[in-house]
Image (cartoon, rainbow, N blue to C red):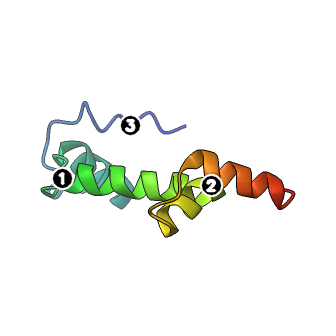
């Protein structure tokens, strides 16, 4: 099996011709710092909330009808047989 650990490699992967292309990639990926764009966390949270409401029909109805409360929406849903 391949016992190569890219976190322990200290040389220059582009000058070491004994490394395979995959090993070179793994070394560079371990050294690469993660960079988040400004506001990416807020966008992710917003997308996750939108996904949650996509699976909740009551929340979706409340978004489509700003004056509708959760209790009213649930009452309407029960009256329609949902």
Q: Nearer the viewer, mark 2 or mark 1?
A: 2
Q: Are marks 3 and 1 in contact (CB under 8 Å)?
A: no
In the image: residue 51, left or right of residue 47 = right
Q: CA distance from mark 2 to mark 3?
A: 52 Å
Looking at the image, is 17 positioned above or below residue 27?
A: below
Q: Circle 1 is placed at which residue position?
A: 36
Q: Which mark is residue 58?
A: 2
Q: Secondary structure at mark 1?
A: loop
| Mark positioned earlier in the residue sequence (2 or 3) | 3
Name the mark on residue 81.
none
Q: Earlier in the sequence, mark 3 or mark 1?
A: 3
Give coordinates of residue 82: x percent, y percent: 82, 56
Q: Is residue 63 visible?
A: yes
Q: Residue at x 53, y 51 (%)?
A: 69
What percent of the width, then of the height, locates residue 6? 30, 39
Q: Farthest right residue? A: 81
In the depicted structure, whether residue 21 falls above or below residue 6: below
Residue 19 visible in the shown view: no
In the image shown, does 41 or 3 lie closer to the viewer?
41
């Amino acid at each position: 099996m391949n016992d190569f650990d890219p976190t322990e490699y200290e040389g220059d992967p582009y000058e070491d011709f004994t490394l395979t292309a995959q090993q070179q990639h793994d070394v560079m990926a371990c050294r690469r710092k993660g960079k988040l764009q400004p506001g990416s966390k807020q966008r992710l949270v917003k997308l996750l909330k939108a996904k949650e409401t996509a699976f909740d029909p009551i929340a979706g109805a409340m978004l489509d009808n700003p004056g509708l409360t959760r209790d009213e929406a649930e009452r309407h849903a029960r009256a329609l047989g949902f």
